[in-house]
Image (tube, helix red, strand yellow):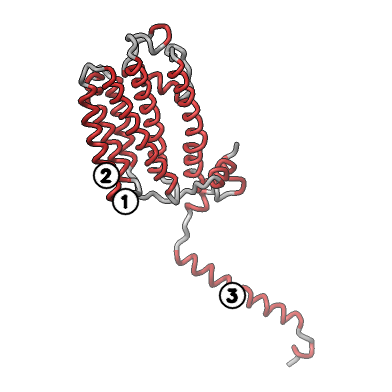
Amino acid sequence: MTQGSVAGRAASIGFRAGPSDSGGRYGLLLILLIVTYLLSASPLSTLADGISAVLFLGVLLLALRTARVSRRAARLVALVALAGSVAATIAVLSTNEDAKGAADIWRGLILLVTAVLIVRRVLARPSVTEQSIYGALSSYLIIGLMFAAFYAAIFHFGGAPQHDFFADKQPANTQTFQYFSFTTLTTLGYGDFTAGGDTGRALAVLEALAGQIFLAVLVAGLVAAYRAPATEGAPGGGSDSSSSSRRLPPSTIRRAAMTRRTKPTATVRKTVSRHESPASRAP
């Protein structure tokens, strides 16, 4: 597929490139998500489990800041999310498996609302900017973390022993849930971790479908539209950077304009002189 056809496809589904704006600062959100994931995958995962609800609350607040919602609705959502996050943090620190499962469900719902707000804001933009790309990538990471939270909830609500969520008695913890979630989302399919129960398998299929649709439709369309201005200048979708980057001085432009105005007059005079009769030329 050529660049021109990709740009045309992006334009046909409603994406249009434009100048950068400050309508949504998703770069900071993307950095926060990467730090959250690395913290969960590090030896400090126990600390990350305790503060994950707070980190996800921060992600939601950043998404609310860039979303086009009323101030009253944003405050209401923030207050509910704050109360729920405090309760989820207390539940994670307890020894009750059902309480931990409820905390995982809450974290998953927080991430789901955040992803919806970001995608809604990205699609509402009149043009595609760098912040749109950052927002789409942030949503992709949020989807992976959301499904990891739902896998953990299935494990805790099941009341099963430590090795019963994954097949072949693989360990079930925060690191393995996130690893399994992102390998499923990206459809890598390493095969070292697979869901052992029907509920986990059904959720994994939904995640794989969501990941493919998200990449093939939203992210690919945004990237193609963002590159569209560089491919619209030349025939066949090629770029004409030499003509666009070369600028003439004002004096040259004025001389060219004067030449264009005087050339037709000289041509008319030559035409009239050729058609004059010999008698008119005699003194």
Give percent across and percent down for residue 202.
Answer: 47, 21
Q: Secondary structure at mark 3?
A: helix
**39 is higher (above) or lower (below) than 62:** above
The C terminus - image quarter:
bottom right
Q: CA distance from mark 1 to mark 2?
A: 10 Å
- The residue where tag 2 is placed is 76
Q: Which quadrant of the rendered structure holds the N terminus?
A: top right
Mark 2 vs mark 3: give the one in front.
2
Q: Is residue 42 above or below residue 113?
A: above
Name the residue located 24 percent from the left edge and 27 percent from the top edge. 88
Q: CA distance from mark 1 to mark 3?
A: 61 Å
Q: Earlier in the sequence, mark 1 or mark 2?
A: 1
- The location of residue 153, given as percent across then percent down, is 34, 21
Q: Who is closer to the viewer here, 146 or 234?
A: 146
Compared with 213, 265 (above or below) is: below
User: In which image quadrant can residue 27 be found?
Assistant: top left
* Amino acid type assigned to the residue bearing label 2 in the image: Leu
Residue on which disc 3 sits: 262
| Closest to the observer, 3 or 210 | 210
Gap between marks 2 and 3 measured at Cα = 71 Å
Residue 251 placement, left or right of 279: left
Which residue is denoted by mark 1 in the rendering? 70
Whether the residues at callouts 2 and 3 have beta carbons within 8 Å, the answer is no
